[in-house]
Amino acid sequence: MLVTRIIGDCPGCKTKNSFGNVNVFGNTLQRGCHHCEYSLEIPLPEITKSILYLDQFFFSHAFREGDEIFVDAAKRIGEATHQQLLTTPYSALHDEETQMWKRREELRDFIRKTARGAKFAPQYHVEKVQVTKAFRAWLRGQAPEYQIAERDAFREDVHRWDGYFYIDVRGYQLDPDELRSSKEKAIEALVASFDSWRKDDTSFEQDVEAELLAAARGYVDAYSELVARIGAGDYSALLYSPVRSSVVEHMMDILGRDKDYNERLRTCGAFLRSDHFKNTPFHWLSARMYATLKDMVRRGAYKNAEEARRKLKGFFYDVNHIATYAPYCDGIVLDSVMAELVSHPNVNLKDRYLVNVFSRRNWNEFLTWLDELKKDLTPEMETALGYINAESLGSTVEQLRLPRR
């Protein structure tokens, strides 16, 4: 048995300095001997962690270690996660942005170590779950308000004690030059559209509806392309079609393949125009963030194109990050530009989804929030932390009554 932390002699075979902590599994600490098969389990108290989303901008500054306020915050975050009070999951979107860095492997490892292996489900998974869940609620005639549930965004329970190890699976490595070029072109196109936005006389509400309609059309178009390719004999489309095509396909399956195809398609279309669809967190936030930016531009913001490109260089990534994961968090750390956007009355992320928004502009509030997490550290948790950190042998085998041979 691999003993991670030796804490003393084995109570079973009496071998000197052979007994200690093996690992933490869920809410159980396993101890064992590397000499014999003796082992025992120590139950750990139930915990509920606060969930903090750290935007790429935070990791970038903390990783460089050139800005003391970020280094200090990173230390406080490390203490809170070590005390099992906080979790800072990473996402595939972090990985994608990291690919554009020269020291990408080092930054990637830094992000994972900070997260202690905690990970959000992929963006496309969260989006699909939300739309499918809203579709089922619409079919049942339930209220259009979306019911947030952590299982939408996590494939594993984040309210578990961290173990000594975590599995790090490297995903597909994207070409950094292509990513960088694509990002620059997208921002150029965004800023280039500002002149026409300033001449546009649509209202904020109309812009929101236009964004939601475009999202709905995106699903239908992706599905139509999938059907057309399969109809033409291109069955590879089942493997390589856009992820969004599977959303309508799944909705069609929910309605039942025994029902008329066109009728099912009309039903899906009706849902995509409904308040249930519009209230899915990803689309609710995305639509309002884009519409709010347009409204800000129309009112005089970002007149200098070069400054706009600099401030909004990560805009599309940030919108995806925030719209996908913020509703499942207790706090989110953003750069000042995005923090201002999501705090705008048109978005009001904090009131809508009860998530605290932090940036350089309210950094002291962020540090206070981190410090106040310690109020949730119970005596039982402190005792358990002592066991996990191998500070003592802890309870005797007779007291625990959990020996295993």
Image (cartoon, grey):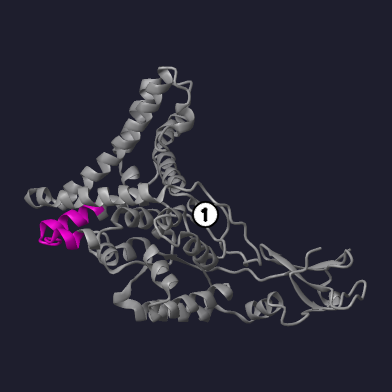
| The C terminus sits in image quarter | bottom right
Q: Amino acid at mark 1?
A: Phe
Residue at the image point whose x is 29% and y is 56% from the top: 315
Relative image position of residue 53 (x, y in whole percent): 43, 64
Q: Quadrant of residue 399?
A: bottom right
Magenta residue span:
290-308
Near mark 1 (Cα within 10 A), the count class, few <14, some 14-19 or many ≥20, is some
In the rendered image, residue 67 lying in the magenta stretch gets the answer no
User: Relative to the observer, which residue lies in front, 376 or 12?
Assistant: 12
Q: Is residue 332 visible?
A: no
Identity of the residue furthest to the right in this view: 13
Q: SS for tag 1?
A: loop
Relative image position of residue 128 (x, y in whole percent): 43, 43
From this view, report whether residue 317 is shown above or below residue 234.
below
Q: Is residue 344 visible?
A: yes
In the rendered image, residue 296 lying in the magenta stretch gets the answer yes
Residue on which disc 1 sits: 154
Relative image position of residue 383 (x, y in whole percent): 68, 80
Q: Is residue 273 left or right of residue 165?
A: left
Q: Quadrant of residue 386?
A: bottom right
Dominant secondary structure (helix, strand or loop) of the stretch shown in magenta: helix
User: Relative to the observer, which residue lies in front, 385 or 117?
Assistant: 117
Relative image position of residue 143 (x, y in whole percent): 37, 47
Q: Is residue 44 left or right of residue 267?
A: right
Residue at the image point whose x is 48% and y is 20% from the top: 258
Identity of the residue furthest to the top in this view: 232
From this view, report whether residue 39 is shown above or below residue 119.
below
